[in-house]
Image (cartoon, rainbow, N blue to C red):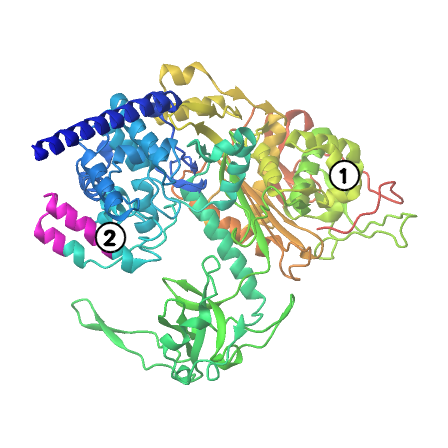
Amino acid sequence: MRFLNIFKLFLIVSLVMSLLIAATVVGGYFYLNPKLPSIEGLSNVQLQVPLRIYSSDGALMGEFGEKRRTPKKLDEIPALMQQAFLSAEDDRFFEHPGVDYQGILRAAMHLVMTGERGQGGSTITMQLARNFYLSSEKTYLRKLNEILLALKIERELNKEKILELYLNKIYLGNRSYGVAAAAQIYYGVDLDDLTLAQIAMIAGLPKAPSTYNPIINPERAIIRRNYVLGRMLQLGYINNEQFAQAKAAPVTARRHRSMLGVYAPYVNEMARSEIVRQFGDQAYVRGLKVYTTINKRLQQAANDSIWNGLVAYDRRHGYRGVIRHVDMDGGSGGAASTGEPADLSEVLKDDENYGRFVPALILSVNDDSSAVPPATETRGGAGAEAAVVAEDKRSAIALLKDGNQVRIPWSGIKWARKYISVNRVGDELKTVSEVIKPGDVVWLAHEPASGWSLAQIPEIQGALVSVDPNTGAIQALTGGFDFAHSKFNRVVQAKRQAGSGFKPIIYAAALEKSYTPATLINDAPVVFEDKALEAAWRPENYSGKTFGPTRLREALYKSRNLVSIRILRSIGIRYATEFAKNFGLDPAELPHDLSLALGSAEVSPLQMSRVYSVFATGGYLTKPYLIQRIVDADGSVLFEADPVVACVSCVIRQQKWSGQDSEDSLVKLPKQAERTLEPRLAFQMNSILQDVILRGTGRRALALGRKDLAGKTGTTNDQRDAWFNGYNPDLVTTTWLGFDQLKPLGNRETASRAALPVWIDFMRVALAGKPERQLPRPEGLVTIKINAETGQIATDTDTNTVFEIFRKERVPAMNSAPQMEVPASGNDAAAIPEQLF
């Protein structure tokens, strides 16, 4: 009887407790439910995705934002990845209603047994609720909210959508959110390219991303990975053989940056700053895709040509010395003298790569100048032998940061004659020891064809910009030697004197007035007095010589300074500065004195590319632009560039060639650019600028083997700046080289030697496979044979004759006196400028 009473009491107490618990749960539900956040937008949630910048052909160039995320649909995520996460986090995900009561019971038992809150019962749905709406603090109230939210989510969304959101939202360490980002950051591959061991490693991260990070805690990461593999084996997702292979796999994770299709950091910064200006800080999280006008192939060519051009200049002027010297015997425990890499690895631990240059420690040098005995090899079936060129024994052995040892041959060292000044280098080297010795820390460069070579970071800087003159679309841009060490973008931020590259504007203004390409201008000394200065201004030609009466065409392609000054004085400074508006320049920003004729105007490379685009298009003024299209995360187009174009029919023809000639694409025709130069004048100028390459200061460009190239060199006073502005009808490219500190490049470093080779290297790639194209000849022009000395129509007795292009109304009369510009003389009211070339 007593037992029966006890049993009844137990039932009563149990019933009361159950009712109390039920009342508490129901009361808690009605109390908390109204305070729960709405999940209506969860099915269409916009995940925080970084700003991404692309080339015109879809190559990723840059990524900006704190969170690295690449959202994926569930069917784009490999099944093995889904199974790994289910095994590690919630194997009953497809069975429970959002809350795993078995897991909660385990957690409750743990609390009763230990008095401590423990892990357990947190399903994938509950984790999703916490990640979207709640904090990660461990409190009973937060847990109850999490449970209620999970149940609410399960009522609104199906299991597949919940799993998809979770795999895209979950934080996996190293700023990676979602499995796709983690695959890129830890392994540098797409999801489909992950191995089973790598999948399990990623699936083990949600529990504690820092603790199980395979980069910083590989031992603990392996333990967690193997746990995930074991769970996958238990659940039947993998077999014993797969388990064993994955468990034996080494840790291969390391920090990877986003896989860039092309390196264009100066472009990225230009685009980023503009997007942030328009969208604010939301630009970094709303998943914007910015498609630029950059051509991937041309951008790579720009990178290579600037790098190689600056390195070539730097080598011409000698070696300034090693980075530093370390005492290999004193600080490396004796074994250092043996050159054992493991003992010296600490020497380079703080040295980072500089662009394509790598730091290295010289271990030994060989000054033996004798040659390695020539080897022979048999070629073909005839048994003919060909001797391999003997190799000089002089060399050095260097240790790289990764522990590898490399050999630097004499061919990679002998260039390093001592730098004495910008105009002088030391004697030719005879031994390796003259320049480097064991213990020296140096920069090295590697080329597949020539192997390793001694290197140094150039002090000189450079810039290159290439645009489509028809639309203004920037095709390639690099603003310096290395963005990581100098973010100053010299294409748009540097204003430097244009030198002789400005002369075509002055000559075009003269042709617009009354000059012809055959007009004679006296190339003779001229002196200008100015009371404001102690001495008179006596400008000179670069050569220091004068050549007497010179035709306008010849004066431009040979870049005669004295002729240019006389032309400017004749047409008037105000007229010339106003005429410069035809090329997109502001007269108020130009010097209003005769130095303008020699290029004292300070302009950026981008401005110069716009100037020469006018010549390349036959007289149309287009405007350079970079951003072609901005697309939101959902694919909607927020912005589409609508530039004015020089040739509307060309754009339509291009649409047809590319298959874009649908009714929609042809409804909105591009806007016609303003024609700022009379077409015949533009054609005459193009002809003269082609002569710059055929017979003038740009003759090096003949190496390209094309007849449709034109341009102009520009070298400023004391060779402080070197420019080449060149083009064909499809592409305008400007290159600039100089020091940021405005110091001379060296006596022989004219534009044709410093800047033009960079332009040639770029255009060789840019125009490869492109047919030659000449500007169409406008009506109203005639070509006449003239006397090369007088500029008059040639007679039967003339022997020194050339053909010249005239506008019909300006053909010189037969047997008339030579066309001569009135010579400048005496005083000029304009301020006396610094001499420029």
Circle 2: element type: helix
- Of residues 382 and 139, the one nearer the viewer is 139
Residue matched to label 1: 568
Q: Say which amino acid is labelled 2.
A: Arg
State which quarter of the image contains the N terminus. Answer: top left
Which sits earlier in the primary sequence, circle 1 or circle 2?
Answer: 2
Span highlighted in magenta in the image = 223-244
Of badges 1 and 2, nearer the viewer stands 2
Q: Which quarter of the picture shows residue 576?
A: top right
- Magenta region, main secondary structure: helix
Q: Residue at x 28, y 23 (%)?
A: 23
* In the rendered image, the vertical position of residue 94 relative to residue 552, given as above or below: above
Image-based side of 624 in relation to 33, left or right? right
* In the rendered image, the vertical position of residue 355 relative to residue 292, given as above or below: below
Q: Which quarter of the picture shows residue 291?
A: top left
In this rendering, the count of numbered labels is 2
Does residue 232 show up magenta in the picture? Answer: yes
**Label 2: how many Cα within 10 Å (few below 14, some 14–19, many 20+):** many
Q: Say which amino acid is labelled 1.
A: Leu
Q: Residue at x 46, y 34 (%)?
A: 293
Image-based side of 381 in relation to 655, left or right? left
Residue 394, image x and y in percent? 42, 80
Residue matched to label 2: 224
